[in-house]
Structures are given as structure tokens and as C-alpha cells.
Amino acid sequence: MKRLRAFAIAVAVVVACAQQQETVRREPAAATAPDGGPLPAAGAIGTEPPAPKVAVGADAGVSPPGAEPHKPAIVKPRPAAAVGDRQHGSTGEPVLFYAPRVTKLPSGATLFELPPTQNAIVNVELRFRSGAVDDPPGKAGLTYLTARVMAEGGTVALSAKQLLEALFPIAAELSVRVDKELTTFRARIHRDNLAKFVPILTDVVVHPRWDPDEFRRLREAAVNDIEKRLRQGDDENLGKESLQELMFRQHPYGRLTLGHVSDLKSMTLPELQQQAMRVFSGDRLTVGVSGGYPPSLGKDLAQTLSTLPGKSAAPAEIPEARPHGPRFLLVEKNADSTAISMGMPWNLSHADPDWPAMSIARSAFGEHRQFNGRLMQRLREARGLNYGDYAYLEHFQQEGFDAATAQTGRARHQQEFTIWLRPVPDENRLFAVRAALYELARTLREEPFSEDEVEQTKGFLDGYILLFDQTDARKLGYALDDQFYGFSSFLTAWRSGVRGVTADQVNGAWRKWIDPARLEIVLAGRDMASVKKTVLSGDPTPIHYQRDATGKTPEKPPAQLATDKGIEKFPFGARGDADVEVTPVDRMFE
């Protein structure tokens, strides 16, 4: 009997769900989009232009970028009015957004308050206009180590252990992020525990403990991070950081933010205390708040932080960086594969009119952790060279292990274009370098981005950009970055600007900014002497396709094999012995 009753209930639930789904399908008037805006009028989705047919490209069997069945961007009607500031995207269309409240305080600090929300979590960012560019000569890593000792070494009232014990029961998050021009103390707390947390947070910045034992512990941890992780166990970031030091030699950005080993070992606790007084001053501070915070939070924080040193030297001037050579930096280390990064400095910024067009081209060429780009489709999918291949318009560090979005708090006045090839087996490393250079060259000549490719990428970005600031913490991070650049609501303006860009504008901007001859290239792996010899001789470097479980090499389309023959001879661009530098890994960041 019980089984019959359970069966009857299950049938009733299924029928009810089916009726509800049918009701929803017949109810167009009340429908809303996932972001809260109105959906297109009834029938609009069904009448969109059909996806383009998949054509066979030069690589035969691989769908050309843009042929994937993504939907074009749907431009939804905007509300007639909204509260907030206003500006225009590249289409001339007004962009509406909710403006932060910005207050300049008598202490010299700036209070930056996003409109409060009903969320239970409160986010605080204490952002200083100070970073690795403020490290004195011979003291690379001083700002990083100073900030870390402040954030983790305890306060006058709490030892480092007591600090952790105080944060744990109230589920508080407290960390620091140091970049080239910015240092941000970042905090996240449930509003019910805010009263307990605020004094701890402000003490970390105003009254750090400067414990000698904690200083020695964290200095040793920083040295180990370079010697053990970066040099030995993290080849991908070794390649990226080596490229940073190559691109920005003789420039304020030209030293690893984490520091150099010999410089870190020479630092003393009094030097950290002096650095804190010099760069973490009130006139360099912006206090940012977002989430479900009480009205008095910003002013309470600002009042407590007003005891920081009031004046400091002006932030360092950031000169323009220019490519200078060598073309190749080859880092010799024992590894099972080779890490590859390439790039060049440039001045493209969020405020540049070319940003929307360049973002479309970049995405079509190699969007981070996505499969729509040419690099990903042709190097990984068609040839199996490695795990992923991406391109970037600005300095990029991923937010967390499983997120594809960029970290905030890394705004810079000098930017860069980079290409990242995840580690490649040694037998294919030079073919991979040539393949990336070959594909980049084709975008400028034989194979510019097509109209279909541009429209599909616009459709992708129209939705993808919405994922970048899904939380109050992310919104605050982007708003503070906007303040750094003197820009308003970058993500909103970017998404609006993308919609009106044509294929001609995309290709015109790409040709204007991209110059493959200016790229500087880093390889980190074993037997770099033979790599240098091949780079200078220009000898062919044919691809070695991976064999299957039976030991056979799978057949590849003839057109792809013909393309491979051209790639294996593509010029490296090195002009002589001085253009290829070999360095042992132990000398990097020393």
C-alpha cells in the first residue's frame, strides 16, 4: 500500500511539473533575462539570423574560428532612465550605471563607497598607491615583504597566532595583494561580525606588530617561494615572470614583485618599518567598501586610518617601455617540457577607443581558458601540442585556481600584449613557437578576422563580460581599478562598445597595434644550447605527432600537413647571436 501511495505521489509531481513548464512556455509577457533585463519580444529569438554553416578551413577538418554555433549578441532595449552616472560607449549609446560615492578626506585619503546591497557579506579594500615600483635599488621585494609582515605578522595587540585565532571563529578573510603600482589589503566578513573585525583590520595597517620572529619566518618563506616554487616547481609562472623581467629591463617594472633572492636576504626589520612609513601613507590610501555594510562603516574606517602618516613622496613616474631585445631569453633548467611566453610592452588602455575592437580580435585569437580562439583550435585541438594557448591585451593573473577571470588590484599605467603557450614537449617546442608566430602573422595578412568570426565573438563577449563582476567584492575591485585609470564603469562601457564594432574596425585596430617583430620570447626548459643553435640557424623544426595506444600516428588531413611544412620553416626573427640569450635558472631573480 505504501508503495502504491508513493508511486501516486510521484506521478502527481511529474504531471504538475509538466503543466508548470507548459504554462511558462505560454507566458511570454512576464519573462525576464537572467541579468534582470527584459527578454526580446516574443518570437525574436526564433527569428535571429541562422548560425553560419561550418566551412572547412586551411587545416581541413578543424572548424574555422567563428564557425561555432554561438548566437550573435542580442541588443536588449534599455530602461528610459536609471540612477547613476552616464557616459558613452564607442557606439554613442548612453551607458548607465550606479555611481560610487567618492569623498576626499582631511587626512588625504579617499573614501570610495559603492551603493550598499542587501547581501550579508561586507567587503573592504584598503588600497595604497604603492607597489614594487617603490622598492629602492638593491631591495627588490621590500614592499611585498613589508605588506606581508603587516598582514600576517600580528598587531600590537595580537601575535600572529592570536591574529589567526581571532579571525577563524568569525569566518573573516584578510589578505594582501601587492603589484607594481598598487598594494591592497583585502577583507571579507559577515556583517554580524563586523564590529569585532574592524578593529583587527585597522590594527593590521596602523599598528603592525613588527615581530622579529615573524619577519624572519616570512622573509624565509619569500626566498623559498622563489628558489623552490618559481625556479623548480612552477614552470608556467617561471616563463611568465622571466618574460616580465625581459620586457621591462631598465624599467620600474623590471624586477619581480616578490623580490630577488639576494635582496630579500639582505633586508632588515627596520628597513620594512621605514618602507611602511614611506609608502603606506594617508595621501596614498583609498578606503573602498561594498556589500551589505552599515552607513557609518566607511567613515569609521577612515577615522581610524587617519593616524597613518599623512604625507609621502609622490608615486613613482612610470615611463613608456619599449622593446629592446634580446628577441629570445632561454632559461636553462631541468624539466620534462618547455614553458613558452612571448610579448611586448604597449600603451593600450581601457580608455582607448580601440579597446572594444582589440578585445574582439584577442578573443578570436586566444581567449583565456576558452576554446573559441585560433591558437587553441589550431595548436591544441588540431595538433595536440599542449593543454592551452592564449593571448592577452593587458597584464593578467587568474583569480583563483578554478576561475577564468582576471584578478583586480593589478591596474598599471604601462601595459603589455602577451601570448602564453602552456608547456610543450621538448620535441615540439620550437614548432609551437613557430606556430604561434605563424598564426599571428596570418591575422595581419592572409587571414584577417572574418565577419562571421567577429559576429560570433561579439556574441560570446556580450555574455562573457557579465561574468566578470558577479560578486560585490569583484564590483569593488573593478570600480577601484576604474578610479586608478580615471575611467567610469569599464565593464559596462566595454560590453556596450563591443556591440557596434565591425570586422573592418577589428582588423584595422589589430594591424595598428600588433607588430610581431617587437615580440620578445622566453623558453624555460632543458638543453637550451641546442635551442639557441636552431633559432640562429633557422633549421626546420617539424612537428612530431603523438602516437596512439597501438604506436601508430593518427592520419591528419593533407591540408593540415601542408600547413605544417610552412610552419616548420617560419622565421624566428632573431637577428644574430646577441639576440638569443641563455641564462641558468639559478641566476633568474637572484
Image (cartoon, grey):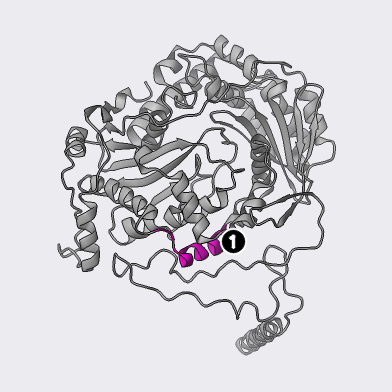
Residue 461, compared with residue 526, is above or below; it is below
- Amino acid type for the residue under numbered disc 1: Gly
Residue range in magenta is 448-464
Indicate whether residue 516 is drawn in magenta. no
**Left or right: 148 with respect to 472?**
left
Q: Quarter of the image containing the C terminus?
A: top left
Q: Which residue appears at 66% of the width and 36% of the height?
A: 187
Residue 505, compared with residue 214, is above or below; it is below
Residue 473, compared with residue 196, is above or below; it is below
Q: Quarter of the image containing the N terminus?
A: bottom right
Q: Which residue is tagged 1?
A: 463
> Residue 558's x, y, as percent?
20, 67
Residue 124, compared with residue 315, is above or below; it is below
**Left or right: 298 with respect to 492?**
right
> Residue 34's x, y, as percent?
67, 65
Q: Which residue appears at 62% of the width and 90% of the height?
A: 4
Farthest residue toward the right?
295
**In this view of the protein, can residue 310 be seen by the observer?**
yes
Does the magenta stretch mainly form a helix, a strand or a loop?
helix
Indicate whether residue 451 is drawn in magenta. yes
Q: Which residue appears at 65% of the width and 66% of the height?
A: 75
Q: Residues within 10 Å of mark 1 (few under 14, many from 20)?
A: some
Label 1 sits on a secondary structure element that is helix
> Residue 348's x, y, as percent?
53, 41
**In this view of the protein, can residue 236 be seen by the observer?**
no
Of residues 152 and 223, the one drawn nearer to the viewer in this rendering: 223
> Residue 463's x, y, as percent?
59, 61
- The answer to which image quadrant residue 329 occupies is top left
